[in-house]
Image (cartoon, helix red, strand yellow):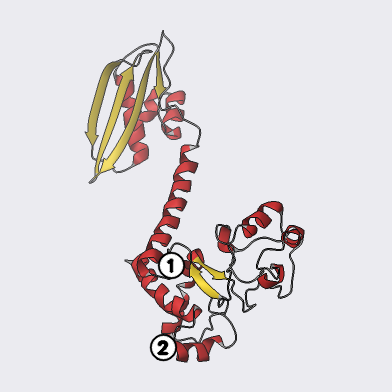
Amino acid sequence: MVDVNQALLGKWGWGLLTNRVSLCMQVSKSKYLGHETFLNTPVPNCASWTWKNFCKSRNLIQKGAYHFNGDERSTIIWEHPWVPGVEDFKPIPKGSPCHGNFLVADFILADSTWDYPKLVATFNAQRASDIACVTLPSFPQRDSWIWSSSPNGKFSTKLAYLTDQKDCAISFGQAVASISECPAVALWEHPPEDRCKINFDNSIQKDVLTVAAICLDSTGSVLGIETKLHPHTSSVIGECLAAKLAISLKISHLILEGDSLVAIQSLMMGPDLCQ
């Protein structure tokens, strides 16, 4: 539901970005924007609840909006997102960051083609190639904002929601991938051929302590299992009782394995300490 609300708010944010005419937009722009654009203006602490909610949609809008360069010389290369297919729609300059209001129109020749040598001098080869692939209008058009995932470039609540969900899915996939790249951990190590291994553990549920011990040979075959209930709620006591249960199986040449340092140290000092 939160994501749907963000997409609905995005429609209002898109209207502020594209100068959509409405009384609410006109009042909001005159009060909070001034000469700034909707994506860049800071949110004052004294802003109304409505304006703050409009501004919450900016992150969503920035995922899919870029500035189309027509003929009005208003697209600033370091400020506006304007290259589709590039991260954040903003190309990174070659060398140190550049300052100043350099316009996209400054990189376009009189015949409405890109000044490729100038692109290569300003951006790295890959970004210059990406920019050169952007189709320029063959006849004069107004500079405008385009929604990248829309066939006609227009914003829609449905497409905004899908764009946001796609981004969340990518983040989730990266998180899953990072988990899957963790090194494999052996869950249980087989004992030597002349030994058996007894694993012991405990669990607490509804003020009842359950202790268990299981004995396996070197092939992983189960030789014996014991479980008991105790009226305790301490996990440390549970580990000690589980260790005691393991000893009660009376199997010689065995290895005891548990995850309680207290119980293991007590066994090393003497089984009676587990009483």
Q: Secondary structure at mark 2?
A: loop
Q: How far apart, in angstroms, are the residues tagged by discs 2 and 1?
A: 22 Å
Residue linked to disc 2: 22
Name which residue lies at 50% across and 42% down: 178
Task: Decide: is 212 above or below 209.
Answer: above
Name which residue lies at 32% across and 23% down: 246
Task: Decide: is 220 above or below 162.
Answer: above
Residue type at numbered disc 2: Ser
In the foreground, 152 or 125: 152
Residue 170 percent coordinates (x, y): 45, 51
Q: Secondary structure at mark 1?
A: loop
Q: Nearer the viewer, mark 2 or mark 1?
A: 1
Residue type at numbered disc 1: Asn
Give the numbered dot on residue 152: 1
Q: Quadrant of residue 4?
A: bottom left
Residue 269 percent coordinates (x, y): 46, 25
Instruction: Tell me if residue 147 can be seen.
Output: yes
Instruction: Tell me if residue 95 can be seen.
Output: no
Q: Point out the tag, 2 or 1, that comes first from the N-terminus.
A: 2
- Number of on-image labels: 2
Structural crowding at the residue carrying mark 1, measured as other residues with C-alpha within 10 Å and reported as few (<14), some (14–19) or many (≥20): few
Q: Are marks 2 and 1 in contact (CB under 8 Å)?
A: no
In the foreground, 222 or 70: 70
In the foreground, 51 or 232: 51
Name which residue lies at 42% across and 32% down: 259
From the viewer's perspective, is 163 left or right of 183? Answer: left
In the foreground, 216 or 155: 155
Task: Decide: is 105 above or below 206.
Answer: below
